[in-house]
Amino acid sequence: WAQDGALSDLPIANSEDDFAVDDEFDIDEDYENFSVKDPYEKYNRAMFKFNDKIYRHIFSPLSKGYDFLIPRKIQGSFNNMIRFASTPKRFFNNLFQKKFKSSFIEFERLLINGTIGIGGFFDPADRVFGLNQQNEDFGQTLGFYGVDAGPYIIWPIVGPSTRRDALGLGGDTAFSVFTWFSIYDVESQDAFRAIGIVKRINNYTYNVRSNYERITDSAIDPYI
């Protein structure tokens, strides 16, 4: 979980794409090449313990109840829709980083999944056409232009990040479809807040819980 936000190959725990699995990423092989700036380790360890209790005693029971009520396939489809809704974030951040091919792939994915995929409910762009999601966020864009990652820091509830990625999260929020609709459609604000809560529960259940428990339960020092 101690991941340096300066490293664009690592998943950053700041968005709904945080925990997408990259089959080419070998954490055992690559971790040795990375160093993590952790000047606030004493605070971070305390916050890690606090968050761990929240995860295990609140998030996990809620997640298991959600798991019981919502079939896995429905969770996967909802996960697809959330990822589809975050297309503007990936499109623009690839564009800002001059990854024009990746931006075009995201545009193609938008057209295919928005039509054949029934509004992102399915992901034929990946499964049928081999167009993989091009994950980039605003924190990585800041890094592309030379902004230092800054220290590793663990936020209450939100979890691990860096100073740069905390700023990047604000930029990614500006690209969020949910942000746009919640601002311009005042009457729907409560509905979008509810969707945001369900989005986080679904992401934790579908992508995070089993990996988090597997990693921390087997670790000698879960913080590291």
Image (spheres, rainbow, N blue to C red):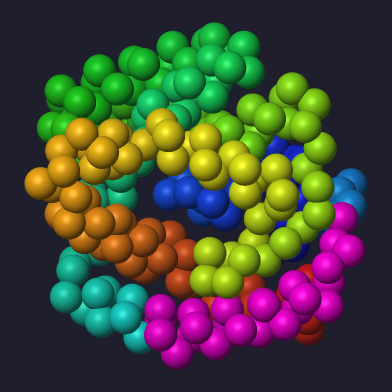
Residue 75, horizontal then vertical, whole percent: 25, 59
Which picture quadrant has residue 213?
bottom right
190 left or right, relative to 11? left
Q: Which of 170 and 4 is in front in this view?
A: 170
The residue positioned 33% from the left and 22% from the top of the image is 109
Q: Nearer the viewer, residue 181 or 220?
A: 181
Occupied quadrant, residue 50: bottom right
* Magenta stretch contains residue 59: yes
For the point 26% across and 74% down, which residue is it? 67
Name the residue at 67% across, 66% down: 154
Can you say whether 102 is above or below 223 in the image?
Answer: above
Is residue 205 visible to us here? yes
Magenta residues, as a range?
37-60
Viewport quadrant of the C terminus:
bottom right
The image position of residue 35, as x and y in percent, is 89, 52
**Residue at horizontal 50%, vertical 83%?**
54
Above or below: residue 220 compared with residue 22: below
